[in-house]
Every structure is written in structure tokens, then in C-alpha cells.
Image (cartoon, helix red, strand yellow):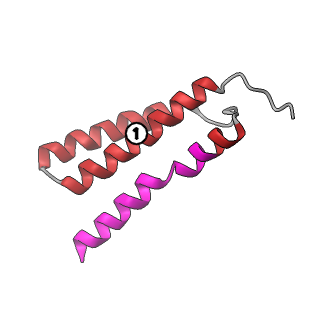
């Protein structure tokens, strides 16, 4: 049961930023994104991946790699769309 709860928590955490990424891509605007927060989150996720490697815990490794990719993608699209205004 403990392993299942951990996996569910990891998956939910991993997909948490997907709605933000989808919104940035759809609207082609990134004004509402806090890049400082995303960069700190990326550093934390990278540390979790490292921790998972040290512990040989594959759910930690894979869910955090997925989260890393989502957040790096958010940074990339945020950079691309950073100057788009709210003009319709």
C-alpha cells in the first residue's frame, strides 16, 4: 500500500505543471509564469532525480525526469512567448 501511495503522489506531482504548459502553448503568452519559481522547481526536480538514482528508486527517477522535461519545456515556450502581449 505504501508503494502505491508513493507512486500516486509522484504521478500527481509530475503532471501538476501540465495545465500551465498547455495554457502557455495555446495562448502563446507567458506573462503569468514565474520563471524564478520554475527554475527553483527545476533545481529541486533535478535533485530528486539524483536522489532517486542514489536510492535506485525507479518511480522517483522516472516521475521526476518527466516533471523536469515538462518544466524545461515550459521555460522554453515561456522564453519564446515572453514578449507576446495581451492584444487580441
**Where residue 58 sits in the image (x, y, percent)?**
19, 53
Is 47 within the magenta? no
**Residue 3 versus residue 21: which sits nearer the camera?**
21
Picture layout, residue 52 above or below residue 29: below
Is 21 within the magenta? yes
Q: How many marks?
A: 1
Q: Residue furthest front?
A: 26
Q: Left or right: 33 with respect to 70?
A: right
**Residue 80 versus residue 30: which sits nearer the camera?**
80
Q: Left or right: 58 with respect to 83?
A: left
Picture layout, residue 8 above or below residue 28: below
Quadrant in which residue 25 is drawn:
top right
Q: Which residue is mark 1?
A: 69
Quadrant in which residue 77 is drawn:
top right
The N terminus sits in image quarter: bottom left
Q: Residue furthest right?
A: 88
Q: Residue furthest bottom?
A: 1
Q: Left or right: 50 with respect to 9?
A: left
**Where residue 22 sits in the image (x, y, percent)?**
60, 46
Residue at the spot x=26%, y=52% of the render? Answer: 60
The C terminus sits in image quarter: top right
Q: Residue furthest top?
A: 83
Q: Left or right: 40 with respect to 55?
A: right
**Where residue 81 sits in the image (x, y, percent)?**
66, 27
Q: Which residues are magenta?
A: 1-22
Residue at the spot x=66%, y=33% of the render? Answer: 30
- The secondary structure that dominates the magenta segment is helix
Quick one: SS at disc 1? helix
Residue at the spot x=37%, y=33% of the render? Answer: 43
**Residue 84 versus residue 51: which sits nearer the camera?**
84
**Where residue 80 sits in the image (x, y, percent)?**
61, 24
Amino acid at each position: 500500500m505504501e508503494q502505491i501511495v508513493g507512486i500516486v503522489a509522484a504521478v500527481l506531482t509530475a503532471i501538476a505543471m501540465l495545465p500551465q504548459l498547455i495554457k502557455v502553448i495555446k495562448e502563446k503568452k507567458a506573462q503569468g509564469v514565474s520563471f524564478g519559481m520554475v527554475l527553483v522547481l527545476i533545481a529541486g526536480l533535478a535533485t530528486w532525480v539524483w536522489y532517486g538514482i542514489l536510492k535506485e528508486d525507479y518511480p522517483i527517477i522516472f516521475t521526476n525526469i518527466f516533471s523536469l522535461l515538462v518544466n524545461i519545456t515550459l521555460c522554453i515556450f515561456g522564453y519564446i512567448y515572453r514578449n507576446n502581449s495581451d492584444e487580441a
